[in-house]
Every structure is written in structure tokens, then in C-alpha cells.
Image (cartoon, helix red, strand yellow):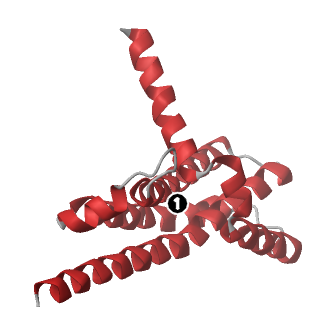
Amino acid sequence: MNKTISNLKISQFGLYYKSYGGFKALLKSPYIWYALIVSLVILITQGYNTWYEDALSILPDIVGFSIGAYAILLSINNQTFIKLLASKEGDKITPYMTISSAFCHFIFIQTITILTAILFKYAKVESAFLNAIGLFLFIYSLMLILATIFSILFLSNWLEKVINSNIKTKN
């Protein structure tokens, strides 16, 4: 039984990793590079080591927004649209899983950042290097808001096309 649960956890993370595109997709994302640049600018100009206070006051609401947006995605009840998004061609990841894994990534990174901020706050971490990593995670979490918004826009555009093509077909 424990082996089954362990395999399930590994396969869940593996599904996320594969659907998101792995480390390669992470490095190709402009959001991670923008986060790195903004973090470096902040560190050079301010040496910011209390990032966790801002993270703990901002990120919980953002995680709520991300989960809400993901719930909206999962509640779309247009069968034609769902079939279009989930239709599989060979071994390719479907658009449905691509979008779903993107939301999973947003929520995963934001949650890891919140947990890191809690650790830094209560452990009173003073290492400049570790604080730089924490600040980067926080800024990256904020950049993922943009990614979430563009994913919602992408979905809206697809849904609009499906609805309009159904209307034209009926007329």
C-alpha cells in the first residue's frame, strides 16, 4: 500500500513536470528571466533581506486568485471546447494539460515561496545568498501573475472561437 502511495506521488509530480515541459520550459520562460533581472536590481540597489514580510502579506491572496482561475478552467462546461483542448495527437501534450500544468506551476511555485517565507521569518535567516534566493522566488511568484493572466486570455480566445464556430454552423 505504501509503495502505491509513493508511486502515485512520484507520478503526480512526474505528470506536472512532463506536462509543464520540464527544466527546459522553465529556462525558456521569459518570466523567470524577468524575475532574475528585477531581483538583481533590488539586491544591488537595496540589499533586500526582509522580502519574506512582503511575500507573506501578498502571496496568500495571489494563490487564492490562481486557484480560483484554475477552478474556472476546470468548470468550463462546453463539451466541444473541452474535446478540442483535450484531443491528443500521438505523444504530444494536449493544450488542456499544457494549460492545466501551467496553473499547477503557478500554484506550486507560489506555495513553495510562502513556505520558504515562513521558514525565513521564524528561523531568522540572515544569509545574503539565501535571502537572494528567497527574493528571487518571491519576484518569480509575482511574475507568474502575468503568466496566469495570459493563460486566461488564451483560454478565453479559444472558447470564443469554439462558440463562434458553433453559431456559424447552426446558422
Between 85 and 61, which is closer to the camera in this rendering?
Answer: 85
Q: Position of residue 74 (x, y in %)?
A: 27, 58
Q: Secondary structure at mark 1?
A: helix
Looking at the image, residue 121 sits to the left or right of residue 149; the answer is right
Task: Pick the quarter of the image with the N terminus.
Answer: top left
Q: Residue at x 58, y 63 (%)?
A: 141
Against 108, residue 78 (above or below) is below
Dot 1 alpha-carbon crowd within 10 angstroms: few under 14, some 14 to 19, many 20 or more: some
Looking at the image, residue 3 sits to the left or right of residue 156; the answer is right
Q: Quadrant of residue 147?
A: bottom right
Q: Residue at x 49, y 39 (%)?
A: 15
Q: Position of residue 30 (x, y in %)?
A: 70, 71
Q: Which amino acid, by three-letter code, is at mark 1?
A: Leu
- The residue where tag 1 is placed is 56
Q: Position of residue 39 (x, y in %)?
A: 77, 69
Against 28, residue 166 (above or below) is below
Against 45, residue 31 (above or below) is above
Q: Position of residue 38 (x, y in %)?
A: 76, 74
Q: Residue at x 34, y 67 (%)?
A: 69
Between 131 and 72, which is closer to the camera in this rendering?
Answer: 72
